[in-house]
Image (cartoon, rainbow, N blue to C red):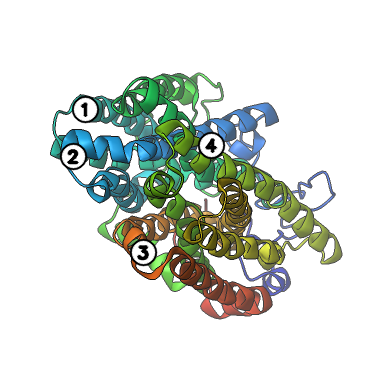
Amino acid sequence: MAVLEKDVHEKNPTQESAVSQDPILEPPIKLDRHGLPLVPQPTNHPSDPLNWPYFQKVYVALLVSLLAFTSQLTSALPNPAFNVIAADLGVSVTAASYITTVWILFAGVAPMFFVPMANVYGRRPLYVIGYLIAALSDVGAASASSYGGIMAARVFNGIASSIALGFGAASICDLFPQGERGLWIGIYTVSTTNGPHVSPIAGGFITENLSWRYTLWVPAIIQGTLWVIVLFTLPETLFSRVDFSKLENERSYFKRMFFPGKVLDRPIRFRDFSVAFRMAKYAAVALPCIYYMTCNTYGSTLFAITGSHITKSVYNFDPGQTGLFMGVPLTIGCLIGELLAGWVSDLLINAYARRHGGYRKPEVRLWLLPWTTFLATGTATYGYCIQHKKPWIDAAITMAISGLGTQVGTTVVYTYCTDSYKPQSGEIGAIINLFKSTFAFTIGFYALDFGEKSGYDVAFGILAMINVIATFPLIFLLLCGRQVREQQGLPQEHQDL
């Protein structure tokens, strides 16, 4: 990107500022359909993803979103079958739930160590290799005869399937400028969030009509098919705005399918493996991550981990009914939530830019925070419904309400963080995923016991309150985020991306 003029930089403390409009020092400014400067400014190179045909960018964004969706689908498809799995393998229901929670843990940690490779060798090799391993490990899990064998295969599947969860947002940031990003990150996040919600719907009927092992065979078929699609149709999106890319002269879509070795000519240093961790020192990353880990865990994972036991003990549902109860309300709630999130935040930030000389202030996206209060309201009320054995439809409605707030919170976090530090979007996606997954991993150890001993109304009410408390730092960023980012400065890594 062109060097920023001093007065412009002071106006916009992030690297997502508008470039200088001096015709002598800089090339002509490229504008979006609103007449505002594109941020970042596209280069004149055909390999620059910002210059790709719109339909191609849409295809890549939708494919990455589908990969994220199926990764999450794979993680949670066995959830409605925990009771059956426990009886078949001779373990407790809690131990059976570890089939999901161990996946969540390793899917959260793995991308942190893949970031340096993604920033040098590109995103595409990780997608291709990752989804091949994912498909093979699905086969291993489905074929395993012991509980330990299934757990080992799920560890490898979590690591391999994590690629889209850790780098999906970065891939979308490669494709779209700041003013268009909210819509597509919203589609990506609703895919990520709804994977665990749709999976119980299918998982329940698969368990009921085939067997619980097909909740592991079906992901093998899906991820194997997607691996073929990725191998032949997913191009490289990594591009340096300063050094350009080794793909610079490979202008055809077909040629971008090959592995060129290093996409960017730079070494991978040992310290590069800590960049994602170092991003946590920035308040505009750490505070949203803390909020998001409570958002995802208490607005989504909580229902997935406890649903099989609750529906059996309270409503005496079979696996098919359990899957519908666990999946449909949250899916509907999240879809409604996204209708109020990504594209709306684009409207807000572009409207702000028209009144402020083209500057898109990341904190504007946080104006959607009031919608996130639906999460705590829904989760706390759900606990009340379960404790007092209210009709299942009442509990289902509260789950949908919680899903609405969860989805708005998810989209707000991803868009705000990547707007604040776009060149580090790979690291941001990885650390958001780390916070989310490691925190969600722990819920399997306490959620059911907490609800049984203290009452679900008390337990879920306390968990909902934790989410409310985590919202207050985001309100602080809404009011003071720009000043905080100015004081902390910019990360030095990957300024050319």
* Circle nearer the viewer, 1 or 4: 1
C-alpha span from label 1 to label 4: 25 Å
- Nearest to the observer: residue 350 or residue 309: 309
Name the side, left or right, on which 235 lies relative to 57. Answer: left
**First in residue order: circle 1 vs circle 4:** 4
Q: Give amino acid for label 1.
A: Gly
Q: Which residue is mark 2?
A: 152
- Nearest to the observer: residue 225 or residue 307: 307
**First in residue order: circle 2 vs circle 1:** 1
Q: Give the number of the disc on residue 65.
A: 4
C-alpha span from label 2 to label 1: 9 Å
Q: Which residue is mark 1?
A: 140
Q: Give amino acid for label 4.
A: Ser
C-alpha span from label 3 to label 4: 25 Å
Name the side, left or right, on which 313 lies relative to 486. Answer: left
Q: Residue 344, how many percent across, how many down?
A: 75, 52
Disc 3 crowd, CA 10 A, few/some/many (<14, 14-19, 20+): some
- Nearest to the observer: residue 448 or residue 155: 448
Q: Residue 69, how many percent across, how many down?
A: 49, 36
Q: Residue 40, how many percent across, how many down?
A: 65, 51
**First in residue order: circle 2 vs circle 3:** 2
Q: Give the number of the disc on residue 277.
A: 3
Q: Are marks 2 and 1 in contact (CB under 8 Å)?
A: yes
Q: Residue 272, how many percent across, how many down?
A: 33, 57
Does residue 367 lie above or below 39 as drawn? below
Residue 450: image quadrant is bottom left
Instruction: Name the element at disc 4.
Output: helix
Name the side, left or right, on which 344 lies relative to 441. Answer: right
Q: Are marks 1 and 4 in contact (CB under 8 Å)?
A: no
Q: Give amino acid for label 3.
A: Phe
Q: Give amino acid for label 2.
A: Ala
